[in-house]
């Protein structure tokens, strides 16, 4: 039983780890602090709610069932964090946001004080680790403590769920962010199931019925599912966006390989920068694009634009669109210029150049076009080591 609680706490801890760079990089960002605070509170709730941790807390303090108001206070703090996160997400008039924030702090702070007051006034000498809610459901002051935390949790979940579902409809089509909000919405909606089964079990005690199994056997798995969904709701957008970005960078890096091979023998104006074996895809892509553009600048004076224009007409005659013909013609001119020996008459070659030196080339499109050129089989087909244009 305890291991399942700790496992969920560990998953939530992964969510904290994902958010930590954003928190450290934006210490003045209230939204980043709010998300981190919410996740840390959730980690604490599941860690301290494990039966073995409850027993340890009771033993350390020497007070029977001391862990109950402690965990209920953490859960109440989690409720407040959920509401504050929604308030920050929605934004609005700063004065209104501040008023709502202080209302949440004040109301849930009072709930926590009331929890401890009820615990101090109640009779709780029999330690209960798994069924405290139902065992003390009819005990004065302990009964009020249990109802207070359940009602506070229910109110927070209702408000948070309603606001999340309303927000979800505005985020459709936004990919990973939408997926994260859906996971959070489902997670918070399941919280209502947790509250319902707990309340049903408590009310059943008042009417001399035994539905304790709802509280002891049904509620914990529901709470575990809620914790996993909330953790995934915060992890998925961050991890998904990162994975999509890396995949796109890798596709672009590979797409530039033909052009990099074509330009591998063009002397660079700057010393080559070595790339380490385990360098990130982003770094490799930046290096490849930089060296390609540098090589193209070196080739600029040797591009025969008369032949370029003839190539455009030739490709148009083959049924290519104007954009396709332009890209193929540029690829043809680059292949021709790259294949000319270095011992050329630079002054004579410069007379051929008519391309605007500030023209922005779509190097990815040119690289892909190189695969369709008949001359590619004679232009550098062997990869070069790291640190050259192909890196």
Image (cartoon, rainbow, N blue to C red):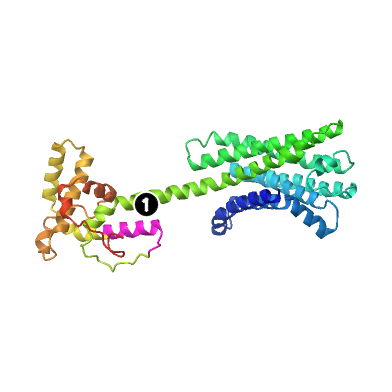
Return the x and y of residue 252 as percentages of the image width and height: 34, 50
Asked if the magenta segment contains residue 278, the reply would be yes
Residue at position x 15%, y 40% in the image: 315
Please, what is the dominant secondary structure of the magenta stretch? helix
User: Quick one: label 1, few (<14), some, or many (20+) residues within 10 Å?
Assistant: some
Residue 106, percent from left and from top: 75, 47
Image position, residue 200 (x, y; %): 78, 33
Q: Can residue 358 be seen here?
A: no
Identify which residue is drawn at 33% across, 67% down: 274
Quadrant where the C terminus is found in the figure: bottom left
Residue 223 is inside the magenta segment: no
**How far across and down, in percent of the image, does residue 17 sit?**
57, 55
Q: Which of 111 and 346 is in front in this view?
A: 111
Left or right, residue 389 beside residue 98? left
Where is mark 1, residue-wise?
250
Q: Which of 189 and 224 is in front in this view?
A: 224
Describe residue 368's horizontal placement relative to residue 352 as left or right: right
Question: Vertical placement of 262 versus 202: above or below?
Answer: below
Judge from the rendering whether residue 314 lies leftward or rightward of residue 34; answer left or right: left
Determine if residue 53 is in view: yes
Q: Count of labels shown?
A: 1
In the image, residue 147 sits, relative to residue 362, either above or below, namely: above
Q: Is residue 196 left or right of residue 226?
A: right
Magenta range: 277-293
What residue is at 52 percent from the left and 37 percent from the top? Answer: 171
């Amino acid at each position: 039983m305890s291991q399942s609680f700790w496992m969920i706490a560990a998953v939530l801890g992964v969510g904290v780890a994902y958010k930590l760079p954003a928190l450290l990089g934006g210490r003045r960002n209230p939204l980043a602090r709010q998300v981190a605070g919410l996740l840390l509170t959730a980690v604490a709730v599941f860690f301290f709610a494990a039966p073995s941790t409850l027993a340890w807390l009771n033993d350390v303090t020497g007070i029977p069932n001391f862990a109950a108001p402690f965990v209920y206070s953490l859960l109440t703090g989690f409720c407040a964090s959920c509401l504050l996160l929604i308030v920050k997400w929605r934004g609005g008039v700063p004065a209104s946001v501040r008023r709502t924030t202080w209302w949440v702090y004040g109301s849930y702070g009072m709930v926590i004080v009331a929890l401890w007051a009820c615990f101090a006034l109640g009779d709780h000498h029999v330690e209960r680790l798994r069924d405290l809610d139902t065992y003390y459901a009819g005990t004065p002051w302990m009964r009020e403590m249990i109802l207070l935390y359940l009602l506070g949790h229910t109110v927070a979940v209702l408000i948070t769920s309603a606001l999340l579902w309303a927000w979800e409809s505005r985020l459709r089509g936004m990919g990973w962010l939408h997926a994260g909000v859906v996971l959070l919405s489902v997670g918070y909606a399941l919280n209502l199931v947790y509250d319902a089964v707990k309340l049903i079990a408590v009310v059943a005690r008042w009417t001399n019925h035994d539905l304790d199994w709802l509280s002891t056997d049904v509620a914990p798995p529901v709470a575990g599912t809620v914790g996993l969904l909330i953790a995934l709701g915060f992890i998925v957008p961050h991890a998904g966006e990162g994975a999509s970005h890396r995949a796109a960078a890798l596709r672009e890096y590979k797409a530039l390989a033909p052009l990099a091979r074509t330009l591998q023998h063009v002397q660079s104006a700057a010393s080559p920068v070595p790339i380490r074996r385990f360098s990130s895809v982003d770094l490799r892509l930046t290096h490849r694009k930089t060296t390609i553009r540098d090589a193209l600048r070196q080739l600029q004076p040797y591009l025969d634009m008369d032949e370029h224009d003839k190539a455009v007409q030739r490709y148009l005659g083959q049924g290519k669109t104007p954009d396709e013909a332009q890209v193929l013609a540029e690829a043809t001119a680059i292949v021709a210029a790259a294949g000319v020996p270095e011992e050329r008459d630079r002054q004579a070659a410069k007379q051929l150049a008519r391309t605007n030196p500030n023209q922005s080339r779509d190097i990815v499109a040119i690289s892909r076009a190189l695969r369709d050129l008949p001359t590619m089989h004679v232009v550098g087909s062997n990869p070069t080591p790291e640190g050259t244009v192909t890196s």
